[in-house]
Image (cartoon, grey):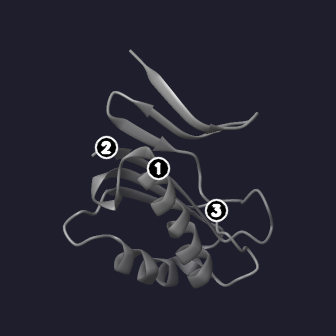
Amino acid sequence: MTIERQQISERMSRIVKHNGIVYLCGQVPKDASKDITEQTVTMLDKVDELLLVAGSSREHMLTVTIFLKSMKDFAAMNAVWDAWVPKGHAPARTCVEGAMAREELLVEISVTAAVK
């Protein structure tokens, strides 16, 4: 049994692979000063980058948890999400409201995917 950790810091690994499954650490927007639409776009860009590095893709996502600072942003976040997820490849998904690590963050995502 091997566990492969990539992009390791003192606090976490950005990617962990085990038994053909990819676990990404929580991803936040590149620029937290933007609105929910732009924050969601740049957050999902980071997910794409990490999935590629891990040997996976959007089509291979298994489960996703999305954290919103406020459910008032649910519809705007979903508009970006719906355009991003490939048709027929929607993962199991949970979306919850929660406190964020920094005040300006509006959205964060946690992704589990299969290796291609």
**Label at residue 28:** 3
Cα distance between the residues tagged 1 and 3: 17 Å
Indicate the position of residue 103 as horizontal and vertical percent values.
Answer: 80, 67
For residue 27, above or below residue 7: below
Which residue appears at 57% of the width and 67% of the height?
A: 43
The answer to whether marks 2 and 3 mark residues whose Cβ atoms lie closer than 8 Å is no
Which residue appears at 35% of the width and 56% of the height?
A: 57
Provide the residue designation for mark 1: 53
Decide if residue 87 is on the left or right side of residue 21. left
The residue under label 3 is which amino acid type?
Answer: Val
- Find the residue positioned furthest to the right: 103
The answer to whether marks 1 and 3 mark residues whose Cβ atoms lie closer than 8 Å is no
Decide if residue 110 is on the left or right side of residue 63. right
Which quarter of the picture shows residue 30? bottom right
Q: Quick one: SS at disc 2?
A: strand
Decide if residue 21 is on the left or right side of residue 66. left
Q: Nearer the viewer, mark 1 or mark 2?
A: 1
Indicate the position of residue 67 as horizontal and vertical percent values.
Answer: 57, 61
Which quarter of the picture shows residue 64? bottom left
> In terms of depth relative to the viewer, which is nearer, 21 or 103?
21
Q: Quick one: SS at disc 1?
A: helix
The residue under label 1 is which amino acid type?
Answer: Val
For residue 54, above or below residue 8: below
Provide the residue designation for mark 2: 114
Q: Counting other residues with Cα less than 10 Å from the Cα at mark 1, is it few (<14), some (14-19), or many (20 or more)?
A: few
Cα distance between the residues tagged 1 and 2: 13 Å
Q: Earlier in the sequence, mark 2 or mark 3?
A: 3
